[in-house]
Amino acid sequence: MNETHIVTIERHIIEEERKHPGARGAFSNILSDMALAAKVISREVNMAGLMDILGQAGHRNVQEEEVQKLDVFAQDVIYRAMDHTGHLCCMGSEEVEELLPIPEKFPAGDYVLLFDPLDGSSNIDVNVSIGTIFAIFRKVSGAERGALEDCIQPGRKQLAAGYVVYGSSTMMVYTTGNGVHGFTLDPSIGEFILSHPNIRIPEPPARSYSVNEAYYSRWSPPMQKLVDHLKGRDGSPGSGGFSSRYVGSLVADFHRTLLRGGLFMYPGDSVNPEGKLRLVYEANPLAFIAEQAGGRATDGEQEILDVQPQGLHQRTPLFIGARSLVDMAHEQLKGHGS
Ligand code: P6P
């Protein structure tokens, strides 16, 4: 790369801010602070195997999942990067049941941060890619230090969304509503460098689908019929010719879908009618990114971004990826429940 064409994420964020008339910089600072937190988390994730940080932290989070030490670390890093800046009125995290307040000793601001600090944590010990997912909203309540209504706005209201994938390289991908842009961490200089400007989900997409087929027997008949079609088992036109890819780490599966195309699915089933993934800090941010990249995201009945959340940790079925493939899935599922 020609050294004079290095665009750091901080530079890109500032240039994005100039596209938002009246922006006062607070919003840009939140994104830059998230990039800093991502660098710190990346360092620990990449050293985890060497620093005996692996293994259970010995307690369970609100999802009743064994908490890995890195989960706790990532949660703490993001909170501490944000709690003192005066830009946020409160935060919401996958790891904490209640809203995360801004400490009284620090000023509160006009924005809200919702995040999953380290999704896919069960994959940490086996060195599979994991990720951080985040969404930023403007405060809508009259409460100086935020309220639940600030954290359960429809995804359509997001000002920005992004994720960090800690994989063979660490990448941060974000949108502020002007396209989707990817940055790769250069550890030698500690900077996220623009590597994937204006990401678009390919159309026609890679003929690839991503779902945990172990749950086939628990799916609705329309969901079973959809996957049978993708596997070429129903002989209908366009049936078959797909490959299957499933990492079991949402950010890794989504990142591949974003760059290559394809269809990622986590449907509801007879055991978990609303599926497993979380609406507010997983499906919504990824849906904003997917739409900005020309794709689509639905819950089988409606666009993810149009769902009015009822609670911070609400689950949702998710069908996301290349528009043509989500359209096909949605038509087969709508009205039947995923
Ligand atoms: P399953 C990881 O635990 C996670 O929350 C997501 O990252 C991933 O997409 C999903 O669960 C995998 O769930 O039921 O297929 O193991």
Image (cartoon, helix red, strand yellow):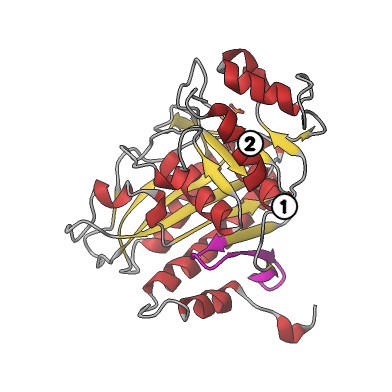
- In magenta, the rendered stretch is 174-195
Of residue 177 and residue 303, the one placed in the foreground of this image is 303
Q: Quadrant of ligand 1?
A: top right
- In this rendered view, identify the residue nearer to me: 109 or 152: 152
Residue 211, quarter of picture = top right
Camera-nearest residue between 301 and 175: 301
Residue wearing tag 2:
328
149 left or right of 218? left
Residue 185 screen position, x and y as percent = 67, 65
Q: Name the image quarter holding residue 313.
A: top left
Residue lying furthest top? 217
Identify the residue shown where x is 79% and y is 21%.
Answer: 235
| 103 is higher (above) or lower (below) than 216 | below
Q: Is residue 117 something one can see in this rendering?
A: yes
> Under tag 1, what secondary structure?
loop
Q: Residue furthest right?
A: 241
Please tell me which residue is depicted at 30% across the width and 41% down the height of the picture. Answer: 98
Q: Is residue 29 left or right of residue 318?
A: left
Residue 165 at x, y = what percent?
Answer: 63, 52
Under circle 2, the secondary element is helix
Q: Residue at x 52, y 26 (%)?
A: 338
Question: Of label 2 and label 1, which has the lower sequence position?
Answer: 1
Distance Cα–Cα, label 2 vs label 1: 14 Å
List the residue tagged with mark 1: 203
Furthest-front residue in view? 237
Q: Is residue 175 magenta?
A: yes
- On screen, residue 18 above or below 216: below
Name the amino acid, label 1: Glu
